[in-house]
Image (cartoon, rainbow, N blue to C red):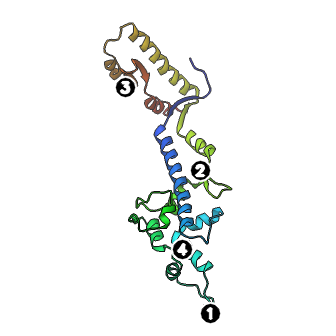
Amino acid sequence: MKTDSKILVWTDTNKAGELDRNVEATQQGANDLIHIFESFQTYKKITSLDDFESLVRDPLAMFDEALQTNVSFQESGGKKGNPEIIAKLFDIDRTSYQSIISGVKIMEGTCKPCAKLKIKQTGKGVINYSSYKQYSSYMAWTDNNRFEINEDLVSEKKESFSYYATTPAQIDCYNFWVNATLTLNKLANRGLLGEPNAFSKLLNDRITYSYQAGKFSVDERSLMNEIQSLKN
């Protein structure tokens, strides 16, 4: 019988897997946006987290600002040039950049800068600010000006998807059902239980039988629900 002060009862692997997928997608999406931005113009590099957050808030505005800031015309009177005109004069494919960030699929062979991209253009658009912020706390800005996943913070969050028996009553409940399962498996091995599934139904599927594994096991979700209903 287990007498530990803390016993793992059940882990919601669906939530843990979903977190992993979402954090990975956010990291990839953020790094892809930087790569796209830097592939379409050579004036501006993303060298800080502040730079990136300005970019993800409005990718076109930052692109246009890069053109306007770095291309000047004599006798302009300090006015910023029209970014669309600047792009045409200097053979910058602003139109394709707009298409990529907004999710418009680009026809193959119509976009020279796209040849530099490692990202396939599927027409889904780039990551937006709200999606980035939802999982930004699980990422770290690195010295190579890209995002990496903070595995420690992800693991810490995933731990919240695990449920434990901690009080004496909860641990007694856990031990009761685990020991009952051990006894049932011994009886089943001696051929004393008859149809295993029929017996499971008598217990309202609190203990289930797997023909593939050839044994009874505690239904962890049901056990967790019972344990959480116990106050002490």
57 with respect to 143 (left or right): left
Residue assigned mark 3:
205
Q: Give the mark, 2 or 3, whose residue is nearer the N terminus.
A: 2
Q: Amino acid at mark 4?
A: Ala
Residue assigned mark 4:
61
Residue assigned mark 1:
75
Element assignment for label 2:
helix
Which residue corresponds to the image point at 46% horizontal and 40% vertical from the top-left?
14
Q: Position of residue 58 (x, y in %)?
A: 53, 69
Q: Amino acid at mark 2?
A: Tyr
Which residue corresponds to the image point at 58% horizontal and 85% vertical from the top-left?
80
Closer to viewer: mark 1 or mark 2: 1
Residue assigned mark 2:
138
Q: Position of residue 138 (x, y in %)?
A: 59, 50
174 with respect to 211 (left or right): right
Q: Give the mark, 4 or 1, whose residue is nearer the N terminus.
A: 4
Q: CA distance from mark 4 to mark 2?
A: 27 Å
Q: Position of residue 104 (x, y in %)?
A: 40, 66
Q: CA distance from mark 3 to mark 1?
A: 83 Å
